[in-house]
Image (tube, rainbow, N blue to C red):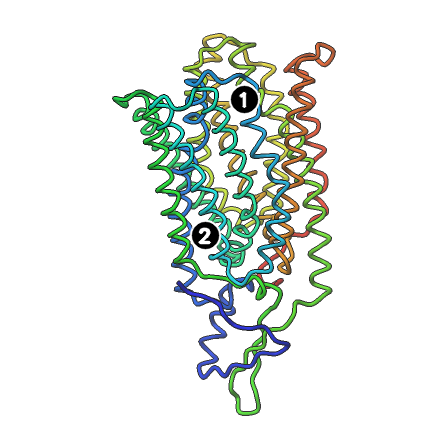
Amino acid sequence: MDSVKVEISTSLNLEIPQIDSLNNVLRSESQSSSRFPKNAIRTSLQASTLDAIFATIFSITTGGILLSNFLVELDASPVIFGMLSSIPMLVNLIQPLGAYISERTTSRFQYSALVYGISRLFWLFLVTGIICKSWGLINSQQLVILTLVIVFFSHLVGGLGCASWMSWLAIIVPRRLRGRYFGIRNSAASLTNLLCVPLAGFAVSHWFGGTLQGYGVVLFVGILFGLVSLGCQYFKIDVNPQLQNTYIEVTRNKDNVGVIHELPLPKNKENDQNSHFWIFLLYFSLWMLAFNLCAPFVNLYLLETLNIDVGWVTVYSSLQAGANLLMVVFWGKLADKLGNRPILIFVGIIVAVTPLFWFGIGNRNLDIWLWLPLLHIFIGGTGAAVDLCNNNLQIGVTPVRNQSIYFAIAAAIAGVTGALGTTIGGFIAQSPHFGGLLGLFALSSICRLAALIPLVFIREQVTGDR
């Protein structure tokens, strides 16, 4: 594993005999990754992509439809499912603490391996619980409670590492390749999800010992893949968080020998970045609030209001995921050429008015066979642009100094506003005074358009700003 182990001082001088080749590397890469060799960056990006694939397999077995089906088999109440969906958003509040701790460490890899290793090993307790249930040592209700406890502590501990991991990846990925790389990485994770969910579901449902035992076996395999994903991180460049508070300057001495200086980041540059970050945070928190007003209730509208068969809803979800998979690479390449902010404004307006399309949708044959599939494909394609560009723009406007703390603040506030949007949407959907779900969709559309206004005041950072 490549590692940065340089101690920081006011001026660090290293004689570089071949200064011309070093200058070529510094000019060809973004400032955040200019201190790393190209081969090391290439290996790190490949390792990060493999990390995403194996981590996706772990996530499939510890959440989504498999975990929901497991709780259904245990006769869990609707309250349990509500708690299950709210835990991941609420534990985002722990991220600032995790960022604060990570900034005082000297290795992103060691911190990530420790935090995520503990978080993923927690699920071994559920495997043990399933074994105890099979032997009659505990009942279904106790296993449900154990599941909730594991979900809570796993996400809580994992939340301590999210901001540090994002800051680690942000400094490794060159700015000029950021959109393309994250597009490919997200596409690989989406493809893994599409292939592995049906395979894992088939394995659970056809396990000779029953679905509960089948889930236990699949969960154990998922935990192993989760640990393998941490092993992939070993091949990424290890970053000392303290070095993110400096920048590299190359000069020549009187003997015409290149000298590297690692200097503190200029205060004026940091203050300029701060202002754009807070504007982005205003936009992102408002967007999460507006988006979650109606997003969780679309399937409810299809199943309950339109009375469409659940099989069709599953097909529509697959079409949406497929469109996301295909379009995310395209949006990544386009973002590298045009920037993330213009795409967010243009596509954001389209996504904002999308909830209004539900007003013309019914349960007629034409809607079921044509308009609903097209609408879900449209949502998947545009949603890929918003998700990717939001992530890239956040990285671009976040100051390098104590970067993980900024990421943690954004995640915590977005988690709170997203949960608030879901809660408000639930009350509005039940109130006849607002027109039910269609009234909620209209309100969400208006709020989404309003949330885009702060984007006008953000100056996206370009290559060489840092």
User: Which residue is drawn at the image coordinates 56% and 40% (left, top)?
Assistant: 156
Q: Which residue is mark 1?
A: 80
Q: Residue at x 58, y 17 (%)?
A: 358
> In the image shown, does 45 or 218 lie closer to the viewer?
218
Residue sitting at x 35%, y 28%: 131
Which of these two is toward me, 97 or 284? 97
Q: Amino acid at mark 2?
A: Ala
Question: Which quadrant does the N terminus fall into?
Answer: bottom left
Q: Which residue is mark 2?
A: 113
Cα distance between the residues tagged 1 and 2: 30 Å
Closest to the observer, 284 or 148: 148
Q: Position of residue 275 (x, y in %)?
A: 73, 53
Amino acid type of the residue tagged 1 in the rendering: Ile
Residue 277 position, x and y percent, is 68, 50
Under tag 2, what secondary structure? Answer: helix
Q: Earlier along the polypeptide chain: callout 1 or callout 2?
A: 1
Q: Residues within 10 Å of mark 2 (few under 14, many from 20)?
A: some
Which mark, residue 173? none
Q: Are marks 1 and 2 in contact (CB under 8 Å)?
A: no
Query: Is 319 situated left or right of 395 in this image?
Result: left
Residue at figure coordinates x 56%, y 47% from the top left: 160
The residue lying furthest to the bottom in this view is 255
Asked whether 146 or 293 is in front, the reply is 146
